Image (tube, helix red, strand yellow):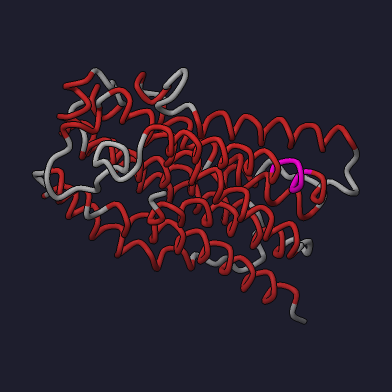
Amino acid sequence: MRLRTLPLAVACIALGTLLAEDHGGMSWPVAILAVLTAAVYQILSNLSNDLGDGLKGTDDHRPEGVEKRALASGQLTVGQLQRAVQWATTLAVILTFVTATVGTTQMGWIWRSVFVVFGLLATLAARSYTLGIAYGYQGYGDLFALVFFGPLAVWGSFTLQVQGWQPLILLAGLGVGMLAAAVLNLNNMRDIETDAAVGKRTLAMRMGLKAAKYYHRVLVLGAYVAAGAYVWLQAPLTCSRSFLFVAVLPLMLSGLRDMRKASNPAQLDALLKPLALQTALFAIMLGVGLLIDSNACAAP
């Protein structure tokens, strides 16, 4: 299930929840349901990716020192992994309907339908990275990661809790989404050689390692531009602004330095978990900083 990737699912929901609290509308039941739903989407994606890559033979040539896959290593059979994917899909659909229903009690059936559709699309996207349409093999994985782990997840969890929506929330979500895409790009840079051997044309493989490293810097630094723009635009000019999330920047710059120096798959693989955790910290500190600001602005 690749539990080290779960901070990405938590990050986007945590930011949406903290922004909802900043607007006076946080709901613990909806927040918990949203976290569970996002986590199941992530687990479904990981299981499906293991199955799809295993069936296509993509994982048969993974180098030493990187994460082993359950199907390719023989830890699970095809049948066992298929059943796991089906169970995760069923749970994702159930949680989608429950979360959409609980979160739209005051918004009406149209909004409920919108969130059910978004949730079902997220379920389909989680299954289809390497299975079915296998959009990951065509280089579209980065776009899906950016959208579903970024603007859509942050905006959705915010809207379900405050029972209303604000377009500017999409900008805050863009920052987290760019970091989620950066995590995927690290993964794809690690696998460039093996992906090329089996025709898995990820964006990193299409660009080549050198260009993918530049693209990675754009994603990480672009996340700070998006978050900074949101902080600047979301409050009146007379109110103080919190850029608490900038405290995570030294860690990310250190990761960028290590990424630049990385010369083999094992070195790139070692950077995945730290960046996922830094993404969660980035999201939490962005939300907490805005809460500190709003409290200070409300003080007499």
Quarter occupied by residue 48: top left
Residue 99 horizontal side relative to residue 180, left or right:
right
Quadrant containing the C terminus is: bottom right
Q: Residue at x 27, y 41 (%)?
A: 74
Q: Residue at x 89, y 35 (%)?
A: 109
In the displayed orientation, state which residue is furthest to the bottom.
300
Q: Is residue 119 magenta?
A: no
In the displayed orientation, state which residue is furthest to the left.
263
The span shown in magenta is 96-100
**Residue 27, horizontal then vertical, whole percent:** 76, 62
Q: Nearer the viewer, residue 260 or 90?
A: 90
The reply to whether residue 159 is visible in this rendering is yes
Predominant SS of the magenta segment: helix
Q: Residue at x 76, y 47 (%)?
A: 98
Up-down relation of residue 117 to residue 97 (above or below): above
Q: Nearer the viewer, residue 17 or 118?
A: 118
Residue 38 horizontal side relative to residue 221, left or right:
right
Q: Residue at x 57, y 65 (%)?
A: 241
Quarter occupied by residue 231: bottom right
Up-down relation of residue 8 to residue 122 (above or below): below
**Residue 223, horizontal then vertical, whole percent:** 43, 48
Q: Nearer the viewer, residue 174 or 300?
A: 174
**Residue 173, horizontal then vertical, whole percent:** 56, 46
Q: Is residue 99 magenta?
A: yes
**Residue 15, horizontal then vertical, whole percent:** 58, 57
Up-down relation of residue 172 to residue 203 (above or below): below
Q: Nearer the viewer, residue 135 or 145?
A: 135
